[in-house]
Amino acid sequence: MSLHRYNSVFVLIFINSYAFGVSDAVNVTAPVSATTPQQAPSYVSPGSSAVVSPVVFKPAVEPAFSVALRSSFPEDLEVSEYCAELLRLFGQRYVAFVDCLVPAARPVKVCQNCFPEYHSLSEVFLNISSDQMGPGNVSCRDSILRSDRLMLVFLLNSNMDTIWQRSNCIQCVKDLSGPNNDTLYYLTLLNQTITCFEKYKQGNLTELCKNCKDAYKRLNDLYSRMEGNKTLCIDLEDAMNVTRKLWSKNFGCSIPREETIPVIAVSCFMLFLPIIFYLSSFLHSEQKKRKLIHPNRAKSYASLMNIQDKRS
């Protein structure tokens, strides 16, 4: 047997011995347990009856401490029970106000429907932000409103105040007393107009324009006066916009304005004013020309008569 064949046999024996040793080591260090996670399929090495199992990595041991914040701080850093109760009450009334605002967004009825919730929310925030001491001589203004950079309670209340002020609800309602007299009268005329629309809209629209003209005109005139007095809120503005859209666009109605004739008269006068000015200027200049020419003619006529008298 040649040296080359001896070397090939030696290499084959070495590879088989190494594979057998590795398979034994893996089987010893990876025992099967009922709690072991599901493993990948085993791999059978060609030319060997041993089954090689994949290496199983166990999760790291849970840390002895948690990185989450503590559930409570020392008592001297926590808010008092009185302030915590005010904070809870503020959250409840804030949610109630938001629940009222969303359905009142379209058609807009923010001032009419949500003034009780806004008033209740304002009362709680006033107690939180007040300098007056509560039970146990405790003030909640610093602990709730000024204890952090975000000032979340103050920010939430400011957003609700902005909505209420931009809606001009103070022009229509007064705290818990409800809509004022002007608003109630406007709503009465609005209901009469809408009722008239509902009555005639299924028939001939010409009849609607004729029969509902007076009701719509009264409503429109009242709205114009309230707009001039700045006593409108967003509820009335939105209601009038919808009513005008129904009257003009949907029903195709119109109301002749009483001030049309004066406007036409003034426009015609302004149109003819330049013509009158130039005509009067022309006549005045012609009159001056006559006054200047007439004396010259008289003098020439007198001189001519004198010449004739001398010749005679």
Image: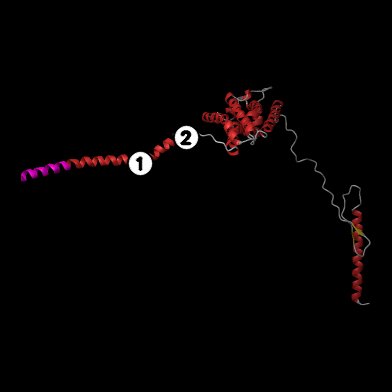
Using the image, determine if residue 34 lies above or below residue 178: below
Residue 242 percent across, percent down from the top left: 60, 35
**Can you name the residue that lies furthest to the bottom here?**
2
x 91%, y 69%: residue: 12
Local secondary structure at mark 1? helix
- Which one is nearer the viewer's eye here, 26 or 96? 96
Residue 94 percent across, percent down from the top left: 68, 31
- Which one is nearer the viewer's eye here, 88 or 103? 103
Residue 123 percent across, percent down from the top left: 65, 25
Residue 226 percent across, percent down from the top left: 54, 29
Q: Is residue 291 left or right of residue 51?
A: left
- CA separation in Å, label 2 and label 1: 24 Å
Q: Is residue 247 magenta?
A: no
**Could you say which disc has been placed on residue 275 in the image?**
1
Which residue is disc 2 drawn over?
260
For marks 2 and 1 on the same chain, the one whose residue lies earlier in the sequence: 2
x 53%, y 30%: residue: 221
Q: Is residue 22 left or right of residue 290?
A: right
At label 2, which amino acid type do we have?
Thr
- Which one is nearer the viewer's eye here, 63 or 185? 185
Please give the range of residues in magenta. 296-312
At label 1, which amino acid type do we have?
Ile
Local secondary structure at mark 2? helix
**Could you say which disc has been placed on residue 30 in the image?**
none
Using the image, determine if residue 302 lies above or below residue 240: below
Using the image, determine if residue 46 lies above or below residue 104: below
The quarter of the image holding the N terminus is bottom right
For the residue carrying disc 2, how many other residues have a C-alpha within 10 Å: few (<14), some (14-19), or many (20+)?
A: few
Q: Is residue 309 magenta?
A: yes
